[in-house]
Image (cartoon, rainbow, N blue to C red):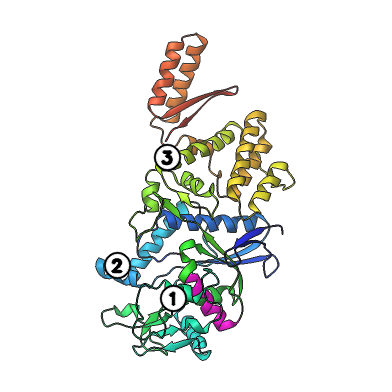
């Protein structure tokens, strides 16, 4: 295939071919479920949803794994604060995650493993690392990874061990042979609830964060697979440590390609819970429809920073209306994608160049212009089909354009008819009065050769 993907590991665009012909295996780091998902999480989910959709549109089978971290310091702390069990908290947050993702049109992954279901695999992997001299038992009961014993540590982040050492902000913790070493198994603390503890060959405790993804990806996709993805903030230390664990254990590349989506920024700072400048998906969906939010994310390249503001979301909704207006004007014909069509070919070329959604979206607007000019059901069908590759334009146009109307459709049509009669009678004052009446209720009229259409402003 002609697809090229930017590989964070090599810092270059590379031609992509799956290890197994016709089958893409992809792992994406999911959420730590102690709270509701914010818009930064939405960006990662939408970005890799588009990736897997494009693989499928290109005729490939996809096994897509997106994990859930359901045991973690933050989860334990939040459950104790709430006076609920860890299981109750994480089940509730996973349900909320699914509701948010479904609203944004994000297809469920092939597998959604929870870390707590794979503790035996994690213990086995830690044992293998210990056998190879890459893991050691600390006096306090923790098991740590010996970073300096793994050649090439820092390749993904592009930093040498000395550079990483120079950037340390904390002193060597008790039991660590080197400040860069990280925990594979945390010994249990008396203050932690019993459901946060597992018994294994290293005593009572729980896995570290990094070992979870290595164990789950290996179990579900094999020791080496095609794509590992996640947010840019996971590049170091999480993904760097995954490489050290998995490649240290198995002696082969963990992933052929490493992909990282860019941040969502608010006032030039990354949106994150730690900074307190985040908006949950639910908060945003309380103000904007889900497809406009998805379009806001999709129309920017997945690796580029994305600036959040109401102005940008308003513009995204207005732009999406233009596309739906074309589909409302000309009902689309059922279409099987023909990649030799000039519009489809340009769309494909854009997506095959590192999932170039900005250029692909530009093709959709070109198509909409042609639909408005030619009234071609076939071109309208192509517009809808290409939009589907991005998870867009699959709803009924009137449902999108008329959402939020304060008048029902029959009442609006009656006023449009009255305005048409007023125009024929050259009663332009009455015609303008009706238009303004509708505009005051958020309903915009558009006169076309085929008649008058209407849509609702945000």
C-alpha gap between disc 1 and disc 2: 32 Å
Q: Which mark is residue 96?
A: none
Reply above or below: 276 against 367.
Answer: below
Residue nearest the observer in this picture, 293 or 266: 266
Q: Secondary structure at mark 1?
A: helix
The image shows residue 350 at horizontal and vertical percentages of 65, 49
Labels 2 and 3 touching (C-beta < 8 A): no
Q: In the figure, is residue 212 to the left or right of 287? A: right
Which label lies toward us, 1 or 2? 1
Res 78 label: 2
- Residue 132: % across, % down: 53, 89
Q: Which residues are magenta?
A: 238-251
Of labels 1 and 3, earlier in sequence is 1
| Viewer-nearest residue: 176 or 168 | 168
Q: What's the mark number on residue 311?
A: 3
Residue labelled with disc 1: 165
| Mark 1 or 2, nearer chain start | 2
- The quadrant of the picture occupied by the N terminus is bottom right
């Amino acid at each position: 295939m002609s697809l090229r993907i930017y590989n964070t590991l090599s810092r270059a665009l590379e031609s992509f071919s799956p290890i197994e012909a016709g089958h893409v295996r992809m792992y994406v780091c999911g959420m730590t479920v102690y709270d509701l998902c914010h818009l930064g999480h939405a960006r990662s989910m939408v970005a890799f949803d588009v990736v897997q959709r494009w693989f499928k549109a290109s005729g490939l089978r996809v096994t897509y794994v997106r994990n859930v971290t359901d045991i973690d310091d933050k989860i334990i702390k939040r459950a104790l604060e709430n006076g609920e069990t860890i299981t109750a908290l994480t089940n509730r947050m996973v349900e909320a995650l699914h509701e948010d993702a479904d609203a944004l049109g994000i297809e469920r992954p092939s597998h959604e493993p929870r870390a707590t279901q794979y503790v035996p695999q994690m213990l086995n992997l830690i044992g293998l690392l210990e056998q190879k001299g890459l893991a050691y038992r600390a006096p306090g009961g923790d098991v740590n990874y010996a970073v300096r014993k793994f050649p090439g540590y820092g390749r993904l982040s592009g930093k040498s061990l000395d550079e990483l050492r120079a950037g340390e902000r904390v002193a060597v913790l008790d039991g660590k042979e080197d400040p860069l070493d990280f925990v594979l198994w945390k010994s249990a603390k008396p203050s932690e609830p019993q459901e946060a503890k597992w018994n294994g060959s290293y005593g009572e405790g729980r896995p570290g964060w990094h070992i979870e993804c290595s164990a789950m990806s290996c179990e579900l996709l094999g020791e080496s697979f095609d794509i590992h993805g996640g947010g840019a903030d996971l590049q170091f230390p999480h993904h760097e440590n995954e490489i050290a664990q998995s490649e240290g254990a198995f002696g082969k590349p963990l992933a052929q390609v490493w992909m990282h989506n860019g941040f969502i920024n608010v006032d030039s700072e990354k949106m994150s819970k730690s900074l307190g400048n985040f908006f949950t998906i639910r908060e945003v969906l309380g103000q904007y429809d889900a497809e406009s939010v998805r379009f806001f994310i999709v129309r920017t390249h997945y690796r580029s920073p994305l600036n959040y503001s109401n102005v940008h979301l308003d513009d995204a909704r207005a732009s999406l209306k233009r596309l739906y207006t074309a589909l409302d004007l000309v009902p689309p014909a059922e279409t099987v994608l023909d990649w030799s069509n000039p519009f489809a070919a340009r769309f494909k070329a854009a997506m095959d160049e590192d999932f170039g959604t900005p250029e692909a979206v530009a093709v959709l607007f070109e198509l909409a212009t042609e639909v408005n000019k030619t009234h071609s059901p076939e071109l309208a069908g192509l517009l809808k089909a290409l939009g589907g590759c991005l998870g867009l334009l699959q709803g009924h146009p009137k449902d999108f354009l008329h959402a939020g109307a304060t008048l029902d459709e029959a009442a609006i049509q009656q006023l449009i008819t009255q305005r048409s009669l007023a125009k024929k009678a050259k009663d332009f004052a009455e015609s303008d009065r009706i238009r303004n009446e509708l505009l005051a209720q958020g309903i915009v009229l558009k006169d076309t050769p085929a008649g008058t259409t209407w849509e609702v402003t945000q």
